[in-house]
Amino acid sequence: MSRKEFDKISTEYTIISVLTTDIIISIGHDLRTPLTSIKGFSQLMKNDSRLQTPTMITHYNDIIDKNSDRLHGAITNLINILEHNKKYIDEMTKNGKKNDNGS
């Protein structure tokens, strides 16, 4: 592998690493928000007898359900991003090894 090819791969890897870190931080916030809502509303339903009417329980269950879907979506997105990045890094590594072997 030439120095120029190595520098290109190194730069691409650095960019991917920075982007991955930024994405993980962003998704961490996306995970925390619905989780906080789920926890808060489930505690309200459990601890405040004034809110334990069928109407309020249905309302809070709807909020919990919506935020559970948001949480699931954020986790799915995170997994997809990390799998994509892993495939890209694996491919870069494989291509680098081919060039090292003179292939």
Image (spheres, grey):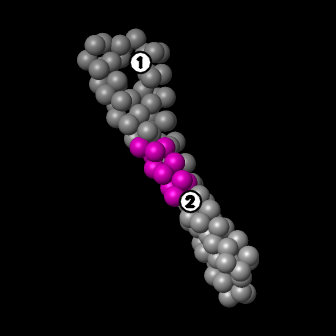
What are the residue bounds of the magenta stretch? 73-84
Neighbor class of circle 2 (other Cα within 10 Å; few <14, some 14-19, many 20+) is few
From where the camera sits, is residue 14 visible? no
Closer to the eye: label 1 or 2: 2
Rendered view: 49 above or below 101: above
* Residue 41 on image: x %, y %: 42, 26
Residue type at mark 1 is Met
For the N terminus, the quadrant is bottom right
For the C terminus, the quadrant is bottom right
From where the camera sits, is residue 57 visible? yes
Rendered view: 17 above or below 70: below
* Residue 13 on image: x %, y %: 64, 71
Is 47 left, or right, of 101 in this rendering?
A: left
| Residue located 70% across and 71% down the image | 97
Helix or strand or loop: what does disc 2 sit on? helix
The answer to which of 25 and 9 lies nearer the viewer is 9
Residue type at mark 2 is Lys
Q: Earlier in the sequence, mark 1 or mark 2?
A: 1
The answer to which of 98 and 4 lies nearer the viewer is 98
Helix or strand or loop: what does disc 1 sit on? helix
Q: Which residue is mark 1?
A: 45
Q: Main SS of the magenta segment?
A: helix
Q: Which mark is residue 87?
A: 2
| Residue located 45% across and 15% down the image | 46
Q: Indicate whether residue 78 is drawn in magenta.
A: yes
Is 98 left, or right, of 79 in this rendering?
A: right
